[in-house]
């Protein structure tokens, strides 16, 4: 198991900027593109740090709730 941090805060992934990351397992990201209908996303991270299982949201507060639920082991 690696201890290096993957998907760092501030990194851009699929057009979204990562704003929070928890234990290399889950990230919260936002898009600054006004044309995106769902500007917030929560992704899980695989062992290589690649994103999968994205949940997209039209508001940041809902995305934050999902991020904290996954970080606490809910998903």
Image (spheres, rainbow, N blue to C red):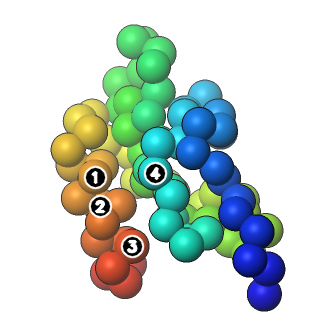
**Direction from residue 40 to residue 13 in the image, left or right:** right
Whether residue 69 sits left or right of residue 34 in the image: it is left
Dividing the image into 4 quarters, which one contains the C terminus? bottom left
Alpha carbon distance from label 3 to label 2: 8 Å
Which quadrant of the figure has residue 36? top left
Instruction: Find the distance from the CA under tag 3 to the CA under tag 1.
Output: 10 Å
Can you say whether 5 is above or below 58 in the image?
below
Under circle 2, the secondary element is helix
Q: Nearer the viewer, mark 1 or mark 4?
A: 4
Q: Which mark is residue 20?
A: 4
Residue situated furthest bottom in the rendering: 1
- Mark 4–mark 3 distance (CA, rounded to whole Å): 11 Å
The mark that comes first in sequence, 4 or 3, is 4
Mark 4 residue crowding within 10 angstroms, few (<14) / some (14–19) / many (20+): some
Mark toward the start of the polypeptide (1 vs 4): 4
Residue at 33 percent of width and 79 percent of height: 72
Q: CA distance from mark 4 to mark 2?
A: 12 Å
> Which residue is depicted at the point 76% across and 69% down?
4
**Label 4 residue SS:** strand
Query: Between marks 1 and 4, how big is the CA–CA gap?
Result: 9 Å
Q: Position of residue 33 (x, y in %)?
A: 47, 15
Q: Closer to the observer: label 3 or label 2?
A: 3
C-beta proximity under 8 Å, tags 2 and 1: yes
Query: Which residue shows up at 64% across the image and 50% down it?
Result: 8
Q: Residues within 10 Å of mark 3 (few under 14, many from 20)?
A: some
Residue highlighted by disc 2: 66
Give residue 64's mark: 1
From where the camera sits, is residue 32 visible? yes
Q: Residue at x 26, y 39 (%)?
A: 60
Residue beneath disc 3: 71
Q: Which quadrant of the figure has residue 46?
A: bottom right
Residue 12 is left or right of residue 71, and the answer is right
């Amino acid at each position: 198991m690696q201890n290096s941090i993957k998907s760092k805060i501030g990194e851009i992934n699929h057009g979204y900027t990562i704003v929070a990351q928890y234990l290399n397992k889950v990230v919260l990201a936002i898009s600054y593109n006004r044309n995106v209908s769902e500007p917030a996303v929560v992704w899980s991270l695989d062992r290589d740090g690649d994103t999968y299982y994205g949940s997209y949201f039209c508001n940041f507060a809902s995305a934050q709730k999902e991020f904290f639920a996954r970080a606490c082991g809910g998903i």
